[in-house]
Amino acid sequence: MQTQSPMVIVSQPNQVIVQNSNWQTGLCDCFSDCGVCLCGTFCFICLGCQVASDMNECCLCGTSVAMRTLYRTRYGIPGSLCDDHMMTFCCPHCTLCQIKRDINRRKAMNAF
């Protein structure tokens, strides 16, 4: 029986650099987009599905901590997993509306 030698990696994959940015609106800036606020208040699940669809993710993930963390890391928005968890737990409607407002603004700037 012949033993195989271990594989040696001689080069690393290219590093992806994410430019840091901030949220386009604050957590409680509901009046900057009343349509999103109303949708988040009265049809929370529908707004979650819209966010998930915008992010090319499963509809069931739209309202989760994972979605907020994914969005934040994708756009280099400062924060932590603990912050995402606390925000999503304490203010689920506000956090989901914030993500959707941010998506809408980035789409308008052709940065989404």
Image: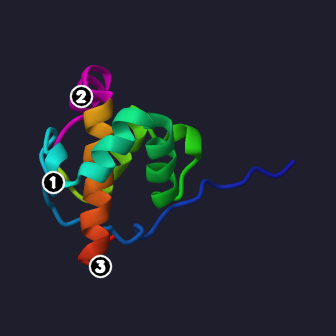
Q: Residue furthest bottom?
A: 110
- Which of the numbered marks, if any, corresponds to residue 46? none
Residue 82 among those drawn in magenta: yes
Q: Residues within 10 Å of mark 2 (few under 14, many from 20)?
A: some
Residues rendered magenta in the picture? 79-92
- Which of the numbered marks, if any, corresponds to residue 110? 3
- 3 or 2: tag closer to the N-terminus: 2
Where residue 32 appears, as percent x and y from the top left, is 15, 54
Q: Residue at x 32, y 68 (%)?
A: 16
Q: Are marks 3 and 2 in contact (CB under 8 Å)?
A: no
- 2 or 1: tag closer to the N-terminus: 1
Q: Residues within 10 Å of mark 1 (few under 14, many from 20)?
A: few
- Which of the numbered marks, if any, corresponds to residue 32? 1
Quadrant location of the C terminus in the rendered image: bottom left
Q: Is residue 12 left or right of residue 25?
A: right
Q: Are marks 2 and 1 in contact (CB under 8 Å)?
A: no
At label 1, which amino acid type do we have? Ser
Cα distance, mark 3 to mark 2? Answer: 27 Å
Q: Residue at x 44, y 69 (%)?
A: 10
Nearer the observer, 85 or 25: 25
Q: Is residue 6 above or below residue 45?
A: below
At label 2, which amino acid type do we have? Met
Please tell me whether mark 2 or mark 1 is closer to you in this view: 1
| Mark 3 secondary-structure assignment | loop
